[in-house]
Image: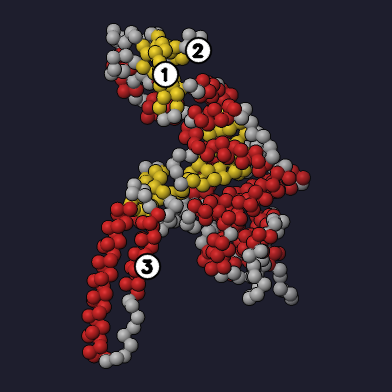
Amino acid sequence: MLLPARVADFVPKGHLARAIKEVVFKLDMGEIEKKYHKLGQKSYAPQLLLGILIYGYATGIRSGRKLAKACESDIVFMYLANMFQPDFRTINDFRKNNVELFKGYFLQVLLICKELGMVRVGTIAIDGTKTRANASSKRSKTKEEYEKWKEQLKKEVNQMVCQAEEIERKEDAEHGDEDGGELPESIRKKEVLIAKIEEIIKTMNDDETVNLTDGDAKFIKDKGEIKPNYSGMIAVTEEGLITATTVITSAYEGEELMKLVLETEKYTSDTVEQVLADAAYGTYNNYEALHNAEKTAYIPDQTVANEKKKKYRDKPEEEKGYKKSKFQYVKETDSYSCPTGEQLIVTGKSSEGGRKYIVYKCNACQNCPVKHLCTTSENRQIKREVREHLKEEVLARLRTKEGERIYAKRGWMVETKFGHFKHNLNYHMFSLRSLKKVTGEFDLICMANNLTKLFQWKTKMALCVA
């Protein structure tokens, strides 16, 4: 070549990096630029660093060191960085110091997608996934356990100090007044650890378990293992765009459903008509909230979900027993009909855990030939939540062919997202620590998803035009 080629010439016209760079330079970076100081060495443009991060997250590269290395040797990253070579500290600090702004950039990207006509939120699917916190399980302890650990560390430090003093006496005898060095590094590290434990203890309750590395991470069960995890949730459209996100430190995701529905409507200025979710979201509160908001729910409850499992279907009838789902509610007489045709009538009311129930009892259990399958009490009783009719409406809808067809969308709308994140991009653990930073990282992952979808949409439109 007589003249050096431009690095952009080596990036294909239909490449994802071009779409990312085009969009990122349209984003308002004013909040980040306010943090830059006029004095000192010139800073990298925030668009370049954000573009590097987004493309890295879209392709499964999150490590600051790997991203920095890619800016030196990978033609696509060199194109995104405009041939600059930010080091790994610069990349990591940019991500760490701006996590609270990533939600805003996620929304700006979503708005661009909406302006292009990509967003239709008539039907959304909602789900969550447990993702490992960047913290060891061994560092999660109760207040009492931290107290014991602190005392053990103090004993070890005292022993090490005594050993160090003995060594110093021997060295003094050999070398006189020459410098014997500073406090050993091993002792200094233990003293720093003791100070950190003492700070954690001050903030803890007696029955609380806190992780020393990431104080926000909680023990959450995932696939049979209980480890420090976060639970990240998303709302997804039929086009595969993520419209709302949230991260919590609890295993109970159901309480976040309406938050994601309302945020989707707020961010897209559109109306959600149908909500698809699995049995984890099948609560009376959600059925009631969706009914009051005039949204059509396709959400099974946990009992129905369990009964659909092959493990349950293969059980003998004697082991299954007569669960509540086998009893038919008769609206006209406000009673239940048992599998043998006997009637359960209203006998009173009760309340439990803030819920109100109507109690139904059967008076013909004594001579029933299948009583052993039904109850060990004198009479079978059933408690009906006062909002039970809302759940029954949803379950009846799910049992129709149309309901089954609509609910089947949930799998490819939302579950494939988490499959892609974890199995294709290897996002099994967050890189950052603390709920605030993890939330920002999760928004970055979801923003990368939406930019990938935007790129795919533009490619499809270009093919259609051609």
Q: Please state which of the two labelled residues, at mark 1 or mark 3, is closer to the viewer.
A: 1
Q: Please state which of the two labelled residues, at mark 3 or mark 2, is closer to the viewer.
A: 3
Q: CA distance from mark 2 to mark 1?
A: 17 Å
Q: Nearer the viewer, residue 134 or 157?
A: 157
Whether residue 309 appears in this view of the structure is no
Q: Which residue is mark 1?
A: 349
Q: Residues within 10 Å of mark 3 (few under 14, many from 20)?
A: few
Q: Please state which of the two labelled residues, at mark 2 or mark 1, is closer to the viewer.
A: 1
Residue at figure coordinates x 68%, y 57% from the top left: 24
Mark number, residue 441 = none
Residue at figure coordinates x 58%, y 59% from the top left: 98
In the rendered picture of this protein, how many numbered marks are placed on residues? 3
Q: Residues within 10 Å of mark 2 (few under 14, many from 20)?
A: few
Q: Which residue is mark 3?
A: 192
Q: Which residue is mark 2?
A: 331
- The amino acid beneath tag 1 is Lys
- The amino acid beneath tag 3 is Val
Chain-order first, disc 1 or disc 3: 3
- The amino acid beneath tag 2 is Lys
Whether residue 264 appears in this view of the structure is yes
Chain-order first, disc 3 or disc 2: 3
Residue at figure coordinates x 51%, y 30% from the top left: 285
Q: Is residue 159 left or right of residue 451?
A: left
Q: Are marks 2 and 1 in contact (CB under 8 Å)?
A: no
Task: Give the x, y percent position of residue 162.
Answer: 23, 75
Question: Which secondary structure, mark 2?
Answer: loop
Q: Quadrant of the N terminus?
A: bottom right
Q: CA distance from mark 3 to mark 2?
A: 67 Å
Q: Residues within 10 Å of mark 1 (few under 14, many from 20)?
A: some
Q: CA distance from mark 1 to mark 3?
A: 58 Å
